C-alpha cells in the first residue's frame, strides 16, 4: 500500500501551488509520469491526488490532453483560520487542528493558524484576517488568561463584528454551565466522564478524587459531572473535587492520604505529573489507588504505569469542524449548535490490579 504521508504531501503541495498562483488558472499541470518521478510515488497515488483536486473543483481533466487548473480555482477557495493559543505546544489541540487542516484541504479550503499577539486588541487581528479573505475562524477559548471569560467573549465578538463566522473548538467561551451563541465542536465530555465513572465502578471504586488545576475550563466541569454521575449510578459512589497543582508534592500527598479508591485527572498531562510526584512520595499506582485521565495523548502509553484514559476522536472532530463551518457560511442564520462526538475508553495498567 502506498505510503499515506507521500500521498498527503503530494496533494497538499499541488493544492498549495494552485492556490498560490504557481499554476495559473487555465494552465496545464505536469504529467502524471512527471509527478511520479518528482515525488517518487506510484501512478495510482498521483491519480488519486488529481482526482481529489478535481473533486474540490481546483482542476479539470481532458482526455488525451492532460490536467488543467480550473478558472475558479483561486477565487472559489474558502479561507479559514485557526485561533489556538500555544498551537504546536499543546497535547490534544495540536492533533485536532492537524485533522481540521486535513479535512479542510480535502474540501478545498485554505487554513492557516495563529494566536493572539500580546498587546494587540482582538478586533485588530479580526480586521486583518477579514481583509486577507478569511471567512471563518475556529477558536479554542483561552484557558489561563486573566478575566478569561470576558477576554474570550471579546475575541469571539470581534470576529463576528467584522463578518467572520466562529466555530468554537473543544470548549465554551462561557464558564460552566452557561452556553454562548456560537457553534461548538468537540468530544462529548460529559459522556466521556460518565464512561470513565462506570469503568472505575466496575473496578470496585466508590470514592474518587478528581484532580484539576484551579483555573480549569468548562470542558473539565463536564468531565467531572460525568464521572460523578457514572460512579453514583453504578456504585452509589462519591466524587470529591481537588483543585491544585499536580507538581506540588504537598498537594499530591494530601490527595493520596485521603485513601480514595481512584484518582481521575482532568487530562493526561495532569495525570502524568500527578503519577510522577505520587511515586516519589511512595504512593504506587494501581496498588494504592487507580488512576485515569482524558485525551489519550502520545505519552499515555509511555508512563511508568501506562494510563487508562478516554481517547478523543480527533479525525472525526476535524471533519465535523469543517462541516459545521461550511454549513454556517452557507446558512449564517442557523441556531447555535453543539456537536459532540463520543470518545473511546482505553483501558491500561493504571486501572488494573489483575
Image (cartoon, rainbow, N blue to C red):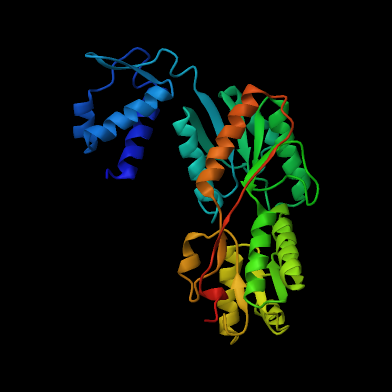
Residue at the location (51% across, 75% down)?
A: 349
Would you identify the image quadrant in which residue 269 lies? bottom right
Looking at the image, the residue that sits furthest to the right is 178
Residue 354, compared with residue 106, is above or below; it is below
56 sits left or right of 193 in the view:
left
192 sits left or right of 153 in the view:
left
Residue 280, compared with residue 12, is above or below; it is below
Q: Where does the image place residue 133, in percent across and percent down from the top left?
A: 56, 23
Q: Where does the image place residue 89, in percent across and percent down from the top left?
A: 52, 54
> 289 or 274, which lies in front?
289
Q: Where does the image place residue 237, in percent across and percent down from the top left?
A: 75, 73
Q: Would residue 214 be visible to someone looking at this image?
A: no
> 53 or 114, which lies in front?
53
Residue at the location (53% across, 27% down)?
A: 79
Would you identify the image quadrant in which residue 138 lies? top right
Residue at the location (73% across, 24% down)?
A: 333
> 115 or 214, which lies in front?
214
Would you identify the image quadrant in which residue 5 lies? top left
Residue 181, compared with residue 194, is above or below; it is above
Residue at the location (67% across, 66% down)?
A: 197
Amino acid at each position: 500500500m502506498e505510503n499515506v504521508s507521500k500521498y498527503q504531501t503530494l496533494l497538499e503541495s499541488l493544492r498549495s501551488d494552485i492556490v498560490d498562483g504557481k499554476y495559473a488558472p487555465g494552465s496545464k499541470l505536469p504529467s502524471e509520469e512527471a509527478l511520479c518521478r518528482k515525488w517518487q510515488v506510484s501512478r495510482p497515488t498521483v491519480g488519486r491526488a488529481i482526482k481529489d483536486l478535481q473533486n474540490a473543483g481546483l482542476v479539470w481533466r481532458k482526455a488525451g490532453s492532460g490536467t488543467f487548473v480550473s478558472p475558479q480555482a483561486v477565487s472559489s477557495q474558502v479561507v479559514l483560520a485557526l485561533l489556538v493559543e500555544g498551537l504546536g505546544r499543546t497535547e490534544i489541540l495540536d492533533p485536532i487542528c492537524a485533522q481540521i487542516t486535513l479535512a479542510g484541504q480535502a474540501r478545498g479550503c485554505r487554513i492557516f493558524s495563529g494566536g493572539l499577539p500580546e498587546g494587540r486588541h482582538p478586533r485588530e487581528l479580526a480586521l486583518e484576517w477579514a481583509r486577507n479573505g478569511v471567512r471563518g475562524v475556529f477558536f479554542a477559548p483561552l484557558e489561563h488568561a486573566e478575566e478569561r471569560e470576558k477576554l474570550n467573549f471579546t475575541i469571539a465578538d470581534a470576529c463576528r463584528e467584522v463578518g467572520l463566522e466562529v466555530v468554537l473548538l473543544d470548549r465554551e467561551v462561557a464558564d460552566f454551565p452557561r452556553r454562548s451563541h456560537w457553534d461548538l465542536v468537540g468530544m462529548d465530555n460529559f459522556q466521556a466522564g460518565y464512561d470513565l465513572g462506570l469503568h472505575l465502578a466496575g473496578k470496585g471504586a466508590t470514592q474518587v478524587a478528581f484532580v484539576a488545576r484551579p483555573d480549569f475550563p468548562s470542558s473539565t466541569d463536564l468531565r467531572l459531572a460525568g464521572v460523578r454521575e457514572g460512579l453514583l449510578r453504578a456504585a452509589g459512589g462519591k466524587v470529591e473535587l481537588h483543585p491544585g497543582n499536580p507538581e506540588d508534592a504537598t498537594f499530591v500527598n494530601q490527595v493520596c492520604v485521603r485513601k480514595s479508591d481512584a484518582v481521575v485527572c482532568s487530562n493526561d498531562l495532569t495525570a502524568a505529573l500527578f503519577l510522577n510526584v505520587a511515586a516519589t512520595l511512595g504512593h504506587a499506582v494501581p496498588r494504592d489507588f487507580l488512576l485515569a485521565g482524558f485525551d489519550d495523548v502520545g505519552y499515555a502509553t509511555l508512563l511508568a504505569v501506562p494510563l487508562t484514559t478516554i481517547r478523543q476522536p480527533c479525525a472525526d472532530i476535524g471533519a465535523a469542524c469543517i462541516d459545521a463551518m461550511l454549513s454556517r457560511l452557507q446558512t449564517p442564520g442557523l441556531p447555535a449548535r453543539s456537536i459532540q462526538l463520543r470518545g473511546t475508553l482505553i483501558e491500561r495498567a493504571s486501572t488494573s490490579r489483575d
